[in-house]
Image (cartoon, rainbow, N blue to C red):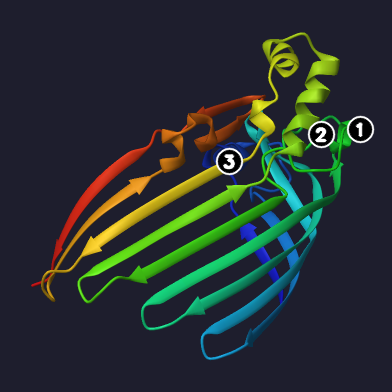
Amino acid sequence: MWSRSVRMSYEEAMKANAEDSSSESSNTPPEKLDSVEFRYERQQSKNLDLAASLFYHYNFQIISYSGGSDAVLGNQKEWGVELESSYHTDKTKIGISHSYTKLLSFDLEDGKSTFITAKPYGYGDDLAQWSNHITKITAEQKLDDKWTLDGSFRIYWGFPGMKDYDQYLHDTSNNNVAQLFEMDNKPYRGNYYLNLGLRYKPTNDMTIGIFGYYLLGIFDRDLNKRNTGYSGFRDHAPAVSVSVEYKF
């Protein structure tokens, strides 16, 4: 599959560009991504489906908003692969996937700076805000005609690109980020999100459910962390919700 995706820029930038009398054109170019993807799917058996995808982003023209006008920040190239499997019976559904993404190049425009990766500055070759390896597991089990148990588990296996970027900041500045880099390796570790749910269907029209989110935080709150960049992160608090659905 070949595809081209576009995304419009910030409204403030488009407005400023439209009102700029010195601009050659009042039209603001969108961010553009050209990619190629190969996908293979196979029904291995009656209950087991397999799939694999390989993609290559060969022309990712990134638009940056700075100083009231649009500007092309740079061109990014990357590739990745995802493996998927799905097992299903009348009572059981299990899905597992694992993806790998790798930055190939990032050509930064002259005079521009970026938080996407430290590669243009000579530090590493990974994305700063994305995990190279990601695993997702979903499951649903019908206990009987009325009770159903389901859950999901997502794993982001670490952030080497963020560590590279903070190493760059550490070597080139004396701000708080640089100092924090020397103190703690925790921001670059993995993120682990476990959600579980139990649904009860007393009648055909009513469903009652109880759901737990970010449950691993009960044992270690930093397993639920969400990276915010610059050696920073915040922890999701474990939470519980109850729902009642009735169709009429």
Q: Does residue 110 show up? A: no
| View extreme (bottom): residue | 46
Give the residue drawn at x 48%, y 63%.
138
Give the residue drawn at x 70%, y 44%.
63
**Mark 3 to mark 1: distance in Å?**
27 Å
**Mark 2 to mark 1: distance in Å?**
7 Å
Splitting the image into 4 quarters, where does residue 136 fall? bottom right
Please tell me how many numbered marks the rendered image carries.
Answer: 3
Q: Which residue is mark 2?
A: 118
| View extreme (left): residue | 248
**Secondary structure state at the residue bearing disc 3:** strand
Crowd class of label 2 (few under 14; some 14 to 19; many from 20; radius 10 Å): many
Q: Which residue is mark 3?
A: 191
Give the residue drawn at x 74%, y 55%.
101
Query: Of marks 3 and 1, which one's residue comes earlier in the chain?
Result: 1
**Secondary structure state at the residue bearing disc 2:** loop
For the C terminus, which image quadrant?
A: bottom left
Q: Which residue is mark 1?
A: 122
**Mark 2 to mark 3: distance in Å?**
21 Å
Splitting the image into 4 quarters, where does residue 237 fall? top left
* Relative to 241, residue 57 above or below: below
